[in-house]
Image (tube, helix red, strand yellow):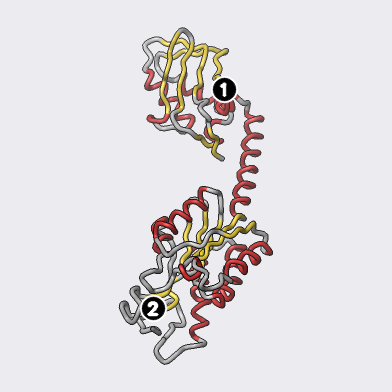
Amino acid sequence: MDYRLLEKTELWISPVQLKGADLGACARAVGGVLGLGDDEIMVTDALEDRLALDILVPTVEASQIVAREEPLLKALASVPGVQLSDDTKVHSEGILGLISLDEGAGREVLERSLTMLDQITENIRKRSIVFATGPEVLNGQIKDTNTPFLLESLRVSGYEAVRGPVLTDELGSIVRAFLWATENAYGLVITTGGVGAEGKDMTLEALTGLDPQAATPYVLKFRKGFGRHQKDGVRLGVGRFTQTLIVCLPGPHDEVVLLWPVLKEGLMANWDHETLANSLARALRQKFLSHTEHNMTVPENDTLEEINGPN
């Protein structure tokens, strides 16, 4: 669990006697115990019997600082020219004061921190937001039936689910929505629409811009430039940005309804993003396999051939 230092970044050690000591070596010794790099800690004062240091990062992990006084003093005492006494202690205000905890109290704090982290992580994971995309939805030309269906389905499954604004088919707008959702601690983002083969479909480009490792398997593959298809196929997308899982679904309502059981299973079982994306794509291919037209071919497995699709 990360602790924010909130500007209480100074710690001091006293009493300390220095005789020809290298202050850089002192900082490195303390930083090594606290898991800080050379550019993340510095000695700011060495007057009389006090050595003061400043932490130059805004956050630290609990395990870096809790109950670390004994190994810190031992490391500092090993620096040539540094002499400590039995009375030497580490002092600080704020979060850094946890350094001075004894082993038993430190263990309790760490266990409590991990419990809190697990609770926070689970709360974030269960916060979801749904974005519909496309000017036809934004302009009210078609009714958004996907969002109400997904909101109800998510809530029944134990998620806190809210409706996001309808997004335009514009790359920057979609990226900003993803970033906003992440910054506001939504653990799950679902979009509907914008995954087709037309030039205006930009949802997957926004996803892969944030997560280059996102899984974007094909559902159908077209000959690029055939009819109105400016891309080579229809794909779905699943990726992750920081703590947020992003799932990009198609726009047709019957396809969203078809995919929900697969998505629910994957969320409940915590599938990795590739397994979830491929399972969703495979389920949607079954729809096209059962409705194959003379000008459309759908492979039965994940090996896709270049095919013509409907205009």
The picture places residue 261, in percent across and down from the top left corner, at 61, 72
Q: Are marks 2 and 1 in contact (CB under 8 Å)?
A: no
Q: At numbered mark 1, what does the secondary structure look like: helix, strand or loop?
A: loop
**Figure quadrant of residue 112:** top right
Q: CA distance from mark 2 to mark 1?
A: 61 Å
Which quadrant does the C terminus fall into?
bottom left
Q: Residue type at mark 2: give it.
A: Lys
Residue 93 - label: 1
Residue 171 locus on image (x, y percent): 39, 60
Residue designated by label 2: 221
Q: Residues within 10 Å of mark 1 (few under 14, many from 20)?
A: some
In which quadrant of the rendered view does residue 297 lie?
A: bottom left
Which is nearer the N-term, disc 2 or disc 1? 1
Name the residue located 35 percent from the left edge and 78 percent from the top edge.
228
Q: Is residue 293 left or right of residue 188?
A: left
- Image quadrant holding the N terminus, namely top right
User: Looking at the image, which residue is at 63% across and 63% down?
Assistant: 154
Q: Nearer the viewer, residue 279 or 261?
A: 261
